[in-house]
Image (cartoon, grey):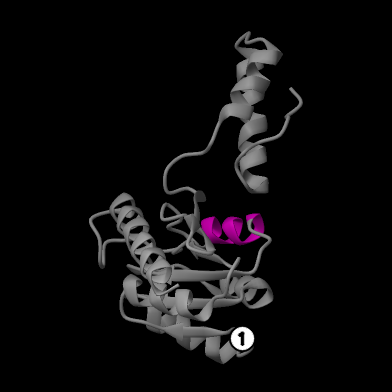
Amino acid sequence: AALGPLCVAGRHQRANGALAAAAAEVAGCDRAAIAAGLAAFRGLPHRLESLGRQGDRHVVDDSKATTPDSTIAAIEAIDHRAWWMIGGADKGSDFELLLERLADSAAGAAFYGATGPRLFQLAKACWPQLNCTLRETLDEALGWCWSSSAADDWIVLSPACASLDQFRDYAHRGEVFRQWCARLAGAERARH
């Protein structure tokens, strides 16, 4: 089945949509119903979930991205000036390709949590052109990204790591991130 417009970003989402459409067609679903279902799909929480504009920035919660490959897919899906928060519990992943992609496209990256020092050291050694910082917590990483960014920039949580060093799970991390972004946007509005 041909895909119409999707409201979710990323080539990987289009591939998922095509597979879902093919499965639905094989199961006997009407093509018009398949197209309508895909057009209405807004994505799932914490999976490249747009939180819309928070103040004058666009915010994305991709807390479910717990591997470097999933964060690379997010980098490929967002073609805007973006600031990235990457880190969390170490799962022994290889981060070289992820850091290379960040160095090629990110406005900046804040590394945090248990993997933060490893990510920061590797980035500084291999991709010194990457504008990055090391922070202890996600809250501190968000603060750096927020203060470093400008109006219309994107702020993206796509950690490439597990959440268990600072949070119960990826959903808890995403919810707390949402609250912190709202707090920063509110403080920004109060200043203006």
Q: Furthest residue to the left? A: 168
- Check the image and report above or below for 91 versus 42: below
Q: Amino acid at mark 1?
A: Trp
Give the left or right position of residue 183, taking residue 22 as reference.
left
Residue 11: x %, y % from top left: 68, 47
Q: Is residue 28 above or below residue 120?
A: above
Quadrant (top left, top right, bottom left, bottom right) of the C terminus? bottom left
Give the image location of residue 16, x and y in percent. 61, 36
Label 1: which residue?
A: 127
Of 153 and 41, nearer the camera is 153
Seen at 63% across and 45% down, the residue is: 12
Whether the magenta-drawn stretch holds residue 132 is answered as: no
Give the crowd class for mark 1: few <14, some 14-19, many >=20 residues within 10 Å. some
| Segment tinted magenta in the rendering | 69-77
The residue located at (60%, 65%) in the rendering is 152
Q: How many marks?
A: 1
Q: Is residue 131 above or below residue 22?
A: below
User: Residue 45: x percent and y percent?
Assistant: 42, 43
Task: List x then y, in percent, for residue 32.
Answer: 70, 14
- Asked which quadrant contains residue 131, the reply is bottom right
Examine the structure image and report whether residue 71 is included in the region drawn in magenta. yes
For image coordinates 63% across by 8% down, the residue present is 28
Residue at left offset 68%, top offset 75%: 104
Q: Secondary structure at mark 1?
A: loop
Q: Main secondary structure of the magenta part?
A: helix
Of residues 52 and 25, which is closer to you in this image? 52
- The furthest residue to the right: 2
**In the figure, is residue 61 to the left or right of 18?**
left
Task: Indicate the quadrant containing the N terminus: top left, top right, bottom left or bottom right.
Answer: top right
